[in-house]
């Protein structure tokens, strides 16, 4: 059973190699229509550079080919893959100046194929580097965090998962991952679709080629298939360490390079640990910020992507983070799965872990009143303030301006067994004033931040008053702060 | 008709042919679960933690983990190799995780420094293994105390059985409880006795409505109030939301079902309020006795409103009634021609001089939109005529247009 499977696997790969690169040794520059003689140079190395902001991977592969002096022709085809035909390039890295590309032909009847016409001044074994873009290979980051029982520190494991849906197996590939957003004017998959008009024709040709190759192989005297080697004693004895993921910056991007090589067959995904931070100092703040977190008092876990946190080597790419917490029984309690945004080196990470039901949070509007009421008299187009003594009784006058006062109490109760920090952001729109003796700071022209701390079991009533000028009284559109002792109203 | 059920399986396999892992043909050993813990602490997510002893050979090993027909959330799977206390020389590393196409499975590549066994713990979230809380409350005959039992019902439709499972409900100790396939288990989680409770009677024309609108009779809602603190023999744990079934002891010592309600999450030191039905022996009539509009100038008015409550207690014991009045509702009743484009809830009001409640409004329940008073109603004496109490609430709405 195992042998049969290996046979199938080997056959599949060989055919893929044939269909990937055909080196045609043709002395006559006029193309033969039906009779080709080809050799099959295999990949010497392959490097994948995968971008996470777009469905794009740069593949660089090297192959060794025999070149004769004079005119040579190379055929490169990529049937049933996601390769962008406009991106395929060849470079003769072993013989610069001696071997060069004269022109490239794209046969109109074979969309996933091209011919390179090469001129060489030497007869040699040359190393060529073929590069192209492909879609279908993606990578993403994800994280697993375990909070300590105290909630003051946590360990963080970072992972990268590479998924291959490109239609091609990449064996022993060097893998490099690019963090950052690049600009593309056309999507690779769109370019692939354009080139696939005559795909059926290619697939029929490939099917026929497969049948011919299989027939040839089966008639050979000695078996062509080789079993994959069993691990040697040396291999088996070696205790492999986790692969290092090197991180380096390049312009506006970061490149994560996985140590050694990886084999990622088509349709498979592979996940590797890219970092581990043992004890990150975590600050927990309870925040009410409706624009950011919705209408809840959110428990926000904060840490910095810096060296103090055993991080800071590179940005944290965006990805989901699963947060657990060590519990009294020595097992893990699940807190929440959260989307982590891209976090630069030195930047603060803020994770909204949702509502903590052990914190009571309620805003109550205790009292409202109005004053500084101005009436508009149509007759004479004049304005008079109520209570100024110059009032004219006029049934047709209308309220034109007034000040609206509101008294609020913010109830807070800390039922947890830890002291907590609370930050409340309130929107006070218009020509407004916030009056209180609380620790209130302006966030912007129309929002204020109220900060407080609660001991274990503590209850607080944070009182503040707002005064907003309405109608013709409003002259500005900004909130001002004023210190004033505000007391609970007597009804 | 034969009923077929397809059960899922969570399997952990160790591949002894480590090189040929992608061929998906393997000889595997199946390490059994040594221990399973079902975590019910998170309100929305159930977590399984299972420990297995995995034989490792020196070098690289592939550990397959598959969950066919079960509802594991794969993004939550965590493998941790636990420190080996007996053989400290065996060290192991998780090198990578591979996900084969079209399968509910993954393969961890683990390297080991020696031949031996490693204790691993696998943690994952699972769907359709749900819990429900419910409570059985037994109230004494004079409704002053309650005995409360909290039950947890676990419904396992996850497609997997957990036969040697410990339940972690957030208590100090786990509970050993095997969970079979499609099985439901129920157990007593907490029990509290002699909890002092309060019973309240409330009327609110806007929120609770009328029993008989034509006769101006309000609905009278009854609630039990449970304080989750040490003073009330509680306060050790927060109360999970769930159904409360309430029984009351009758004169013969048996318990009679008197109603049920959904209890909210109640943190320690917070209050649980349970609706237990409507009182028929307390009658409250509400009428607006007076409404007077006073023009200040042009379109600007002050409005004077007087609400009269006639209250009768037909019970043979005194009760405390809470009368709530919604001020936006009352303002709409007395100032119909109000400019409808103006904000509804910014109301300037004050209590007027004709108010006849003896006490101040209740601080806890009074805000810019609501005012609440408490009235003690005397018990009915024999079959004599019941005393009718009359209370008036005078509200002045100021600066309205």
Image: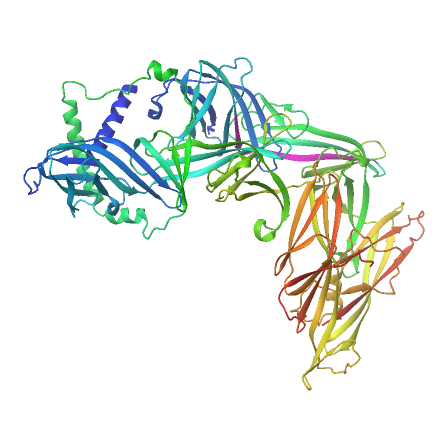
Does residue A60 sit above or below A1 in this rendering?
below
Q: What's drawn in magenta, residue-wise?
A: B122-139
Q: How many marks?
A: 0
Looking at the picture, tell me which residue is in the foreground, B163 or A173: A173
Q: Main secondary structure of the magenta part?
A: strand
- Quadrant for residue A455, please give it: top right
- Most extreme residue toward the bottom, as rendered? A380
Q: Quadrant of the C terminus of chain B?
A: bottom right
Q: From where the camera sits, is residue B46 visible?
A: yes
Closer-to-camera residue (A259/B138): A259
Q: Is residue A110 magenta?
A: no
Residue ranking furthest to the front:
A97
| Residue A93 in picture, x, y percent from top left | 22, 37
Q: Quadrant of residue A72?
A: top left
Rendered location of residue A484, percent (x, y): 76, 59
Q: Residue at x 74, y 68 (%)?
A: A370
Left or right of A172 on screen, residue B88? right
Residue A446 picture location, percent across and down:
62, 60
Q: Is residue A75 above or below residue B25?
A: below
Q: How is the image coloured?
A: rainbow
In-image side of A353 versus A275 (left or right): right
Q: Position of residue A103 (x, y in %)?
A: 15, 46
Residue A67 position by quadrant: top left
Name the residue nearer the viewer: A166 or A487.
Answer: A487
Between B149 and A429, the one lying in front of the other is A429
Instruction: Identify whether A367 is placed above or below A242.
Output: below
Which residue lies at the image location 31% right of the left edge and 39% below the top edge? A166
Q: Is residue A411 above or below residue B183?
A: below
The answer to whether residue A1 shows anywhere in this view is no
């Amino acid at each position: 059973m195992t042998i049969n499977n290996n046979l199938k696997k080997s056959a599949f790969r060989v055919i893929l190699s044939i269909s990937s690169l055909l080196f045609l040794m043709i002395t006559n520059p006029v193309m033969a229509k039906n009779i080709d003689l080809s050799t099959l140079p295999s990949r010497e190395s392959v490097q994948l550079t995968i971008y996470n902001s777009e469905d794009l991977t740069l593949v660089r592969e090297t192959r060794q080919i025999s070149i004769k002096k004079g005119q040579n022709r190379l055929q490169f085809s990529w049937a049933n893959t996601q390769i962008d035909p406009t991106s395929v390039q060849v470079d003769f890295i072993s013989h610069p100046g001696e071997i060069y590309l004269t022109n490239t032909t794209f046969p109109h009847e074979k969309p996933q194929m091209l011919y390179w016409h090469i001129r060489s001044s030497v007869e040699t074994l040359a190393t060529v580097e073929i590069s192209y873009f492909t879609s279908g290979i993606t990578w993403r980051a994800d994280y697993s965090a375990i909070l300590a029982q105290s909630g003051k520190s946590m360990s963080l494991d970072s992972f990268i998962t590479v998924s291959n849906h490109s239609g091609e197996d990449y064996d022993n590939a060097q893998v490099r991952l690019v963090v950052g957003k690049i600009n593309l004017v056309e999507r690779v998959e769109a370019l692939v679709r354009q080139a696939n008009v005559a795909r059926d024709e290619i697939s029929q040709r490939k099917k026929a080629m497969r049948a011919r190759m299989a027939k040839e192989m089966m008639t050979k005297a000695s078996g062509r298939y080789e079993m994959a080697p069993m691990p040697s004693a040396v291999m088996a004895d070696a205790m492999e360490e986790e692969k290092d993921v090197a991180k380096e910056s390049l312009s506006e991007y970061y490149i994560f390079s996985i140590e050694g090589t990886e084999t990622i067959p088509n349709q498979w995904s592979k996940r590797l640990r890219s970092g581990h931070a043992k004890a990150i100092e975590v600050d927990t703040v309870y925040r009410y910020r409706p624009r950011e977190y919705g209408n809840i008092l959110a428990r926000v876990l904060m840490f910095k992507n810096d060296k103090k946190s055993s991080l800071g080597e590179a940005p944290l790419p965006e990805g989901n983070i699963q947060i657990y917490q060590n519990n009294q029984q020595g097992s893990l309690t699940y807190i929440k799965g959260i989307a982590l945004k891209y976090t630069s080196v030195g930047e603060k990470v803020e994770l909204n872990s949702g509502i903590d039901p052990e914190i009571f949070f309620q805003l109550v509007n205790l009292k409202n009143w109005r004053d500084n009421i101005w009436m508009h008299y149509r007759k004479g187009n004049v304005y008079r303030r109520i209570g100024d003594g110059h009032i004219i009784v006029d049934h047709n006058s209308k309220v034109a301006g007034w000040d609206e006062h509101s008294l609020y109490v913010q109830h807070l109760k800390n039922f947890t067994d830890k002291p907590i920090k609370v930050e409340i952001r309130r929107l006070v729109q218009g020509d407004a004033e916030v009056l209180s003796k609380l620790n209130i700071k302006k966030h912007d022209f129309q929002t204020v931040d109220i900060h407080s701390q609660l001991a274990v079991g503590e209850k607080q009533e944070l009182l503040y008053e707002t005064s907003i000028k309405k109608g013709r009284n409003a002259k500005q559109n900004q909130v001002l702060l004023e210190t004033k002792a505000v007391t609970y109203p007597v009804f | 008709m034969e009923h077929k059920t397809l059960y899922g399986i969570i399997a952990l396999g160790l591949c002894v042919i480590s090189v040929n892992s992608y061929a998906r043909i393997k000889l595997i050993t199946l390490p059994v679960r040594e221990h399973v813990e079902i975590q019910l602490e998170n309100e929305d997510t159930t977590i399984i933690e299972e420990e297995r002893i995995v034989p490792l050979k020196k070098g690289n090993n592939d550990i397959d983990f598959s969950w066919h027909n079960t509802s594991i959330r794969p993004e939550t799977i965590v493998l941790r190799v636990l420190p080996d206390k007996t053989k400290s020389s065996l060290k192991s590393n998780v090198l990578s995780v591979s996900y084969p196409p079209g399968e509910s499975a993954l393969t961890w590549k683990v390297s080991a420094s020696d031949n031996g066994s490693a204790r691993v713990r696998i943690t994952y979230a699972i769907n359709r293994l749900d819990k429900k809380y419910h409570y059985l409350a037994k109230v004494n005959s004079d409704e002053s105390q309650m005995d409360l039992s909290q039950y947890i019902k676990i419904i396992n439709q996850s497609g997997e059985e957990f036969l040697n499972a410990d339940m972690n409900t957030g208590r100090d100790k786990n509970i050993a409880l095997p969970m079979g396939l499609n099985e439901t288990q129920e157990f007593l989680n907490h029990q509290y006795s002699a909890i002092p409770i309060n019973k309240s009677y409330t009327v609110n024309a806007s929120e609770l409505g009328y029993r008989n609108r034509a006769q101006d009779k309000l609905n009278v809602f009854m609630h039990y109030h449970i304080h989750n603190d040490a003073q009330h023999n509680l306060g050790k744990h927060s109360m999970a939301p769930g159904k409360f079934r309430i029984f009351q002891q009758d004169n013969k010592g048996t318990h009679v079902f008197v109603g049920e309600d959904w209890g909210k999450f109640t943190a320690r030191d917070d209050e649980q309020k349970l609706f237990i039905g409507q009182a028929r022996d307390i009658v409250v009539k509400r009428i607006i006795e007076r409404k007077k509009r006073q023009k200040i100038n042009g379109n600007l008015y002050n409005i004077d409103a007087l609400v009269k409550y006639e209250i009768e207690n037909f019970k043979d014991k005194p009760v405390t009634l809470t009368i709530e009045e919604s001020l936006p509702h009352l303002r709409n009743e007395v100032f119909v021609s109000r400019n409808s484009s103006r904000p509804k809830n910014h109301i300037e009001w004050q209590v007027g001089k004709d108010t006849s409640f003896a006490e101040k409004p209740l601080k806890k329940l009074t805000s810019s939109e609501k005012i609440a008073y408490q009235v003690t109603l005397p018990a009915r004496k024999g079959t004599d005529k019941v005393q009718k109490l009359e209370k008036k609430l005078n509200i002045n709405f100021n600066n309205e247009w």
